[in-house]
Image: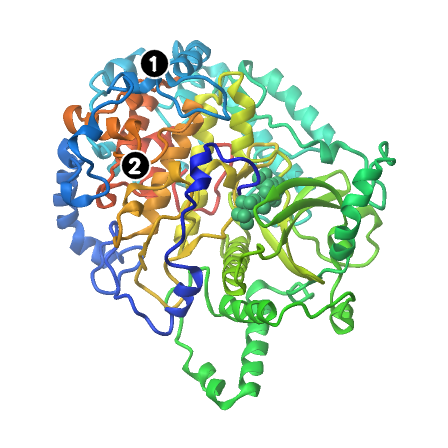
Amino acid sequence: MSGRPELDKDVSDSELKRSRSFSKSIKGLFKSTSPPRKAPGTAESGGVGIKASDKLKKLAKSKELELESKRRDPSAIPPPRLGDAPLAPPAAAYRPQNGHGSKSARSHSYMTDFGKLSLTKQAGNSNASQESLVSNDDPKLKAKHTSGGKADFSFSDGEESDYFQPKAVRSGVHDPTYEESSIDNKLAKTPDNLRRVKSLQRRSSNANATSRSRSLSSTSRYRGRSPTQGSSNTLREQSEDENDAQCVLKSKTFMVFEDGHHKHTLSVTQIVSENHDEDGAKGKSMFSLSGFFKGHKDDERLESALSLLPRARLEFHKRLSRIMDDELKDENDEGSENSSRKGSMPQPVNPNAAIGSEELGMISKISKKIHDGVVMEGSVDDQMAKKNYTLFQKYGKPVGVIGHGAYGVVKVCCIDTANITDERSLDETYVKGTKMYYAVKKLKPRTDEAKEKFGTRLTSEFIIGHALSQRGSEDHKSHPNILKMLDLMQTPDGFVEVLEFCPSGDLYSLLARTAKTGGLHVLEADCYMKQLLHGVQYMHDHGIAHCDLKPENILFDPQGTLKICDFGTSCVFQTAWEKQVHFQSGAVGSEPYVAPEEFIAQREYDPRYVDCWSCGIIYCTMVLGHYLWKIALVDKDPVYASFIEEMRTKREFSVFEEMKHVSPEVGRCRKLCLYAIFQWNPEKRTSVEKLLHSNWMKRTWCCVPYKSSKIAH
Ligand SMILES: Nc1ncnc2c1ncn2[C@@H]1O[C@H](COP(=O)(O)OP(=O)(O)OP(=O)(O)O)[C@@H](O)[C@H]1O
């Protein structure tokens, strides 16, 4: 998302291009050009899958142990090699500039929009605000981990053995009575607190039931602990919280209770609190003529938008198979050249992949639409109108503008379910009272953009988003941390995507808002990190890497459920027909979040490890309140250069060493994870999956229960 000025102007100046496009990956399905690659973290040789089979795992075990012992060697981060230009600058480039030596680098800040706090000041502030909780830490634990200073660049033995953990943790329901050393649990150890925890757990299940008011699709297996809104529910829960557990920390966006649980209290955009009439006009400010004339013509075009998806709400795969069949039928009719394609379609070997034959059919259909241009000049296609609701009929009228993207405006549409008389299924989104809100993102080619490029971007963004939205579990429910892509509609002058609406904005805005008050609380950041990792892992499980993870592409609902969005530059590293992981080359994304291997010319990299790096940077941005560095190139960024230098000479990085946590033990686990993430050599880097199994994440209280996730909670 780039609907706002970038954090740093330089970032947009040097826009990074994508070397391996989505379409290229798709083309590669039938005519594979790149040989199967062995991905780091996969044990299989030859046809490499995301995960090694059990048998192969056993076979590889001895090798893994050997590798593991090597990884524990502090020299795992090698010094930059001269051969690795541009990562290896002349020696002078390593020298601290402007006084930003290894220590003073901490006071260097690239901070622009988040506020003018330097790192030193920021750390000081947040430490002070968190001090009250530190005293609750178990002194035994403190003593136990006094050694926890130096980085060993890997997880401790405990991290690995905890992989096979008791059911209570694996179930995905956070069980504070299990996690011995978590700060949350320590706080919950007194009989009084245990009683409160039980009461909270009971309430949690009640809340799950009431949360249905939030979404009309009540079958979702992923449900947040607290109901979205519906003022009575919110008020009831709030008062129960206050009765049951005393609030020990409160900020504008976050509350921590003495028993360790927390609650996010994100503000909601004004658009949803305004009262809109049937025509989408605001109840009070009806005479805002400028607004009326500005949006009017545009809205007219939106009104006639029709879905490119079939109307009937069949099961996802049936729905898409139908498109596929139609498409193949069309192609067969067109000529004998294509007629053999159906028969020669390879059998899927990877059922988890988000991109399968259904998506391929959709890509073909959408690409054709884009290529043929606008077919609905000025009026609604009669045939389609019979089958389809228009945008206004299905998603309501626009009630406001939520953002300006690089490719068009993002509007909010609202439909009052009380006025719906026919039988129809409604897509899951933000609900307030009887009103449902959708984000409607207009997509049109930039003036200088070639049709083909626009087509690639559109299909990438929509197909990947839509496929991920539908494949959350066995019963095709979505994942809580992936923004739902609900529909793609065609207007007389372009296309619009209909998205689940997130009324609490994006992480970038949240960081900007909270910068004045000391930034996010560390427990708040930890919870978001855990959600982010879950969302990214889910993408990776389905053969997709995001490749542009940054605060602008992370949205929130008011309860703090994090949603990853914007799949326009995502990479399909594995489709339904592939066992191997496809690597890519060339830098993609925003500079501060781009992993170092992406800058190495001609070097192919595993996109999953790039996502892992970006998650680490996002986390640091959340806790520091500013970028960790401007770009991961030693000759361009003195802070990154000092990171490399400090790691080489001292095997630690002062910024990570000085990051405070409310629990020293959790802080120690976190530090190990940070060192494991920021391995500039991707082959030595940890993975998102390993991070989710780390002691840091296991000790992190997360407010989203991942019931059907295979990842331990
Ligand atoms: N579903 C949504 N709910 C709430 N706000 C949204 C939603 N989608 C987008 N926004 C807001 O609109 C702004 C612009 O979004 P958009 O996706 O167009 O950005 P973009 O990155 O420029 O797009 P693109 O990457 O396609 O160029 C975002 O900054 C975000 O805050």
For label 2, the residue is 677
Asked whether residue 7 appears in the rendered view, the answer is yes
For label 1, the residue is 138
Q: Where in the image, quadrant-wise, is ligand 1 located?
A: top right
Q: Nearer the viewer, residue 157 or 192?
A: 157
Tag 1's secondary structure?
loop
Q: Which amino acid does label 1 sit on?
A: Asp
| Pointer 2 local density, CA inside 10 Å: few below 14, some 14–19, many at least 20 | many
Q: Horizontal placement of 629 versus 320: left or right?
A: left
Q: Where is residue 645 in the image (x, y as percent from the top left)?
A: 20, 28
Q: Which of 274 and 260 is in front in this view?
A: 274
Q: Is residue 35 above or below residue 85?
A: below
Q: Nearer the viewer, residue 609 or 431?
A: 609
Q: Where is residue 592 in the image (x, y as percent from the top left)?
A: 38, 36
Asked whether residue 700 appears in the rendered view, the answer is no
Q: Is residue 661 above or below residue 548?
A: above
Q: Which amino acid does label 2 sit on?
A: Ile
All told, the count of numbered labels is 2
Distance between the alpha carbons at the discs numbered 2 and 1: 28 Å
